[in-house]
Image (spheres, grey):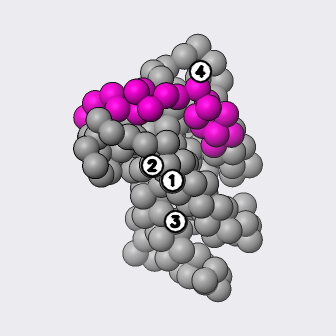
Amino acid sequence: MSQSEIQPIQFEMAIEQIKAARHYTLSMIEDIEESHWFEQPDSCPSHIAWQVGHLAMAEYGLALFRQRGRISEDANLMPGRFRRAFQRGSEPKPDATAYPTPSEIVTTLSLVHERVLAERLEWSMEDLQTTIDQPYAVYPNRLGALLFCAHHEMIHAGQIGIMRRLLGKDPVR
């Protein structure tokens, strides 16, 4: 099937993958105490706060910004300070004062996800065919950005899983 023949089922599958990845991520972080969110266990270059913040920023970028561009409400949804702290290429710092609190990070994660699920109702199959540059998965278009959103989240969920173990937590699965 070529990218010009995007079917509604492909779009729905991409959205369901995004939902499933988020459900899994939330299960990975639900029992991690906020006091451990900025810990970088020995030999671990990251922490839970950065991973979760990065997922919020990435979902915003892939499933909102790449779908419809930046709109005025985005300044509240994804402030520049938040984006810069968690963007691709940023480096996790163990200094909690460099970041929003864990509860603020989770709130942003949830608000971005809710906005994606609401705005998806406005996207047409033609919109999803619009060509984009990397990153994307499967197709070099907006649908590919949605598919990559789910894939990207699962990659980071795996990193969160490793950090859980390094923090002494049992595996989720």
* Residue 136 visible to an observer of this rendering: no
C-alpha span from label 2 to label 1? 5 Å
How many other residues sit within 10 Å of disc 1, few (<14), some (14-19) or many (≥20)? few
Q: Is residue 92 left or right of residue 12?
A: left
The residue that mark 2 highlights is 10
Q: Position of residue 23 (x, y in %)?
A: 65, 61
The residue that mark 1 highlights is 13
Type of amino acid at the residue the image marks with label 4: Ala
Type of amino acid at the residue the image marks with label 2: Gln
Q: Position of residue 159 (x, y in %)?
A: 47, 69
C-alpha span from label 1 to label 3? 19 Å
C-alpha span from label 2 to label 3? 23 Å
Contact between labelled residues 1 and 2, with CB atoms less than 8 Å apart: yes
Task: Please give the range of residues in magenta.
Answer: 113-136
The label number, if any, that marks residue 157 in the structure image: 3
From the image, which quarter does the C terminus lie in? bottom right
